[in-house]
Amino acid sequence: MNDPFDLAAQPREPRFYDKTTGANTYLSELNKDQRAAVETVEGPVLVLAGAGTGKTRVLTTRLAHILHSGHAHPGETLTVTFTNKAAREMKDRVERLVDGPVEGWHIGTFHSIAARLLRSHAELVGLKSNFTILDTDDQLRLLKRVLEAHDVDEKRWPARAFGAIVNRWKDRGIGPHQIADADGLDFANGRTQELYHDYQEQLQSLNAADFGDLLMHNLAFFSKDKDVLREYQSRFRFILVDEYQDTNVAQYLWLRLLAQGHKNICCVGDDDQSIYAWRGAEVGNILRFEKDFPGAQVIRLERNYRSTAHILGAASDLIAHNRGRLGKTLWTESNDGGKVAVFGLWDGESEARVIGEHIETERGRGQTLNNIAVLVRAGHQTRPFEERFIQVGLPYRVIGVMRFYERLEIRDAIAYLRVIAQEDDDLAFERIIGRPKRGIGIASLQKLHVVSRVSGCSLMSAARDLTDSDELHGTARAGLKKLINDFDRWRSLADVEGLPSLTQTILDDSGYIEMWQNDRSVQAPGRLENLNELIGALDEFDSLNSFLEHISLVMDNAETVDGDMINIMTLHGAKGLEFDSVYLPGWEEGLFPHQRALDEGGLNALEEERRLAYVGLTRARHTATISYAANRNLFGKWSSQLPSRFINELPEGHITRSSEINTSSQLVEPDFDFKNIQRPDLGRRRSSWGRYAMHHQSTTEQPLAAENYPSGTFQIGSRIFHQKFGYGTIAAIDGNKLEVSFEKAGTKKVICNYVKPA
C-alpha cells in the first residue's frame, strides 16, 4: 500500500516559500514572549501558555514560521491536537498565514495519526492493514463475549466496568503482561489479567483494534522494530503538540519516542489548566518535560489578553496554593476593572435568585446574554438556575449536559410520580415497567398492549387483569403484581406523606436507587446526585399535581441554541471558552472542592479542583462573581454549608465580600475534612436493568380473533379453546376474565380475548 508518510512524494519547495509575500509580516503582531516561542525552533521547547495568552496563535504561527522560513517542508512536520475541530482550525489558520494551501503535512489527533502509522505496520503486531477500529458499542459486545466465555456473571461484573478498566490500562500504556501492580485487579475475583489477555486475542482474531490499541500498537512496533522507530524519528524533524497538559501516559510515551531523533519538539500547554485526570490526563507529563528533554527551553506566556487585572490577580493567587506546578504569573495591560465579587447567601434558592437579578441588571445595561455564563461544578447544580430563569423569563441554554428535567434518571423518577397521580398514564407506566428490571420481558409487554388495545383500557388496568389470570406466569407475573401492589401502597401514602418523603420511598422501594448504586459506570454517581437534587427540590411544592404542572411548563420551554441566551455549563465544559461575565455558584466545602474527588484522589485531587477553580475565574473577561450558600438542600436534607477553602485563598486586594449571613468564622483551612454531606455508597456492585430479552418474541401468544369474541360471547358451561392451555369449560365469568377448567392444564384464569369458542 502507499505510505502516507513517504517523503519522496513530498514537494521540496512549496509555492508559499516565495519571499515576496513578506516573511516577517506574521511576526510583527506577536509580543516578545510569543515571538520567542515562535522563533525558537531548534531543540525541545515547552511553551507554558497561561489562560488567554494567545496559545493557539503561537502554535499556528510557529508552524507557519517553520514552513515559511524553510526549516522544513510540510512532510517533515507532525502536529498533534486533541480534537478534529482543533486540527481543522489550525490548518485553516496556517494556510491563511502562509497565503496558500499546505499539502503533504501531518496534522491530526493522537488517534488519527497513530491509526495511519498502524496501517503501514499492522503486520508487526499481528494485524492486517485493513483492520477494523471498533467503536464503543462494538467494543462492549466483544467484552461481553469474553466475559461469557469465562463464565463471569455479567450482572455482578458488568462489561462496561471491565471496559473502563481495560481502557484505563491502555491509556497508561499497560498491556496484559504488565498489570501486576495495576489497579482494577479485584474485578471478577482477580481474573482481570486473564480476561484482558483473552480480549486482546479476540481483537487480533477479528483483525480489529479498539481506540486504546492504536497508540498501544504503535508503542509495540516501535519497541519491536527499531528500524521502523528510527525511520519515523528521522522523518518528523519538527513535532508540535497542543494541550500537552491533557496527555495521558501512552500519548506521552509515544511522543517521547518520536522526538528522540531531531529533538525538535515543542509542547504547548498550561499545567494550571490540567483538569481531566478522570479521563486519563497526567499533569506530571508537563511537569517533567525538562527532565525528559535535557536542555529544553521553557518559555512562559504570561501576558493575558482576556481578563481584567483584578480577575487575573485573584486567579493567580488562588492557583499559587498548588504545589505541583511550574509557576507563572498572568498580567495584563488592560484596566483593573471591577474586583471579583464574593457573595454569601442563605440558601441555594437565594443564590439562584440573586444571580438572576444580577443578570437582569446586566441585560438592562445592554449586555447580551450570549456573553454571560453560569459555571457549575456538578451537573445537578443547573436545576435551581433553570427554574429561576424560566420563572423570570430569562432565556438560557444548557451546554454540554442535558437540561435537568430531561436527564434519564429524572424523567424516570417523574414517570413514577405521574403514574401515582394518574394510573392511566400509559407512557409513564411503560417507561418504568422495566426500570429497574423486574423480569417483565417483551412477550409480557406485548400481552399488556394487546389486552389494553382490545379491552380499551389503560396498561395499568390490563396489568391488573393479567396478574389475576394465568396468562402470565413466573417472574413476569410476580414482578408485575408487586409493581401494582407498590403503586397502590404509594398512592395511599400520597395523602399522608410529604412529596419529598413519598418520592424517596418510591425510589427506594422500587429498587431504582439501588439500581444506580450497583451501577459501576462513571455516570452513576452523578445520576444519584441528580435524583437527590430532585428530592430536595420537591419541598417547594404543595402537592404532586402542582409539581407535575410545573414540569409541564418547564418542558414546554423548548430548548434552542439560537438567539440571545445565558450559557449554563459545567466548569469542565467551559475550558477554552470566554465570556464577558461569569458567575461561579456553589463554592462550598464538599461541593467545590467536590468531596467525592477528595475521597478518591486526596491531595492530587484537591490540586485539580483548585485548577478547575482557576479555569472558571479565567473564563471571565470583565466581571467574575463567586457565590456560596450557608444552607443547601442536599440529598433531600437541609445541611449547613461551609464556604469553600478556595474562597479563603483569594487575595483580599482583588475581591469584594458581601453576605446575608455572618460567615467569618466558617472559612476553613485547606486541611479541613468535610464530612457533613451524605454520599451514595459507590462501592455497590452494578446490576443489569432495562433490557428486554429479544428471544422471547418468538414464544409470545397472540390473541385468538380477539375482536370477534368479546366477554359477552361466553357463558358458564361453554366449551372454549386457548392457544396455550388447550380445550376447557368455562366455570365462572368475572367481566373479561374467565375461570376455565382445562382438560389437561387444570383450572386457570384467562382473559376472554385469548380464547375462542370450541
Image (spheres, rainbow, N blue to C red):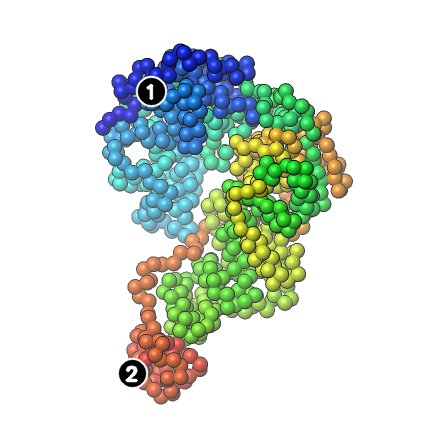
Residue occupied by mark 2: 758
Residue 14 can be seen, yes or no? yes
Residue 543 in picture, x, y percent from top left: 64, 62
Instruction: Pick the residue in front: 13 or 41.
Output: 13
Residue 547 in picture, x, y percent from top left: 61, 59
Q: Which residue is most to the right?
A: 662
Q: How many labels, in total?
A: 2
- Where 255 sits versus 41, above or below? below
Residue 709 in picture, x, y percent from top left: 35, 80
Residue 608 in picture, x, y percent from top left: 56, 32
Residue in the image at 30% along x and 23% along y: 5
- Where 158 sits versus 690, above or below? above
Q: Residues within 10 Å of mark 1 (few under 14, many from 20)?
A: many
Whole-angstrom CA distance, mark 1 to mark 2, is 83 Å
Residue occupied by mark 1: 75
Q: Which residue is most to the front?
A: 20
Instruction: Kindly indicate whether the residue at mark 2 contacts the one at mark 1 (C-beta within 8 angstroms).
Output: no
Helix, strand or loop at mark 2: loop
Instruction: Pick the residue in front: 264 or 84.
Output: 84
Identify the amino acid type marked 2.
Ala
Residue in the image at 37% along x and 82% along y: 740
Residue 627 can be seen, yes or no? no
Identify the amino acid type marked 1.
Gly
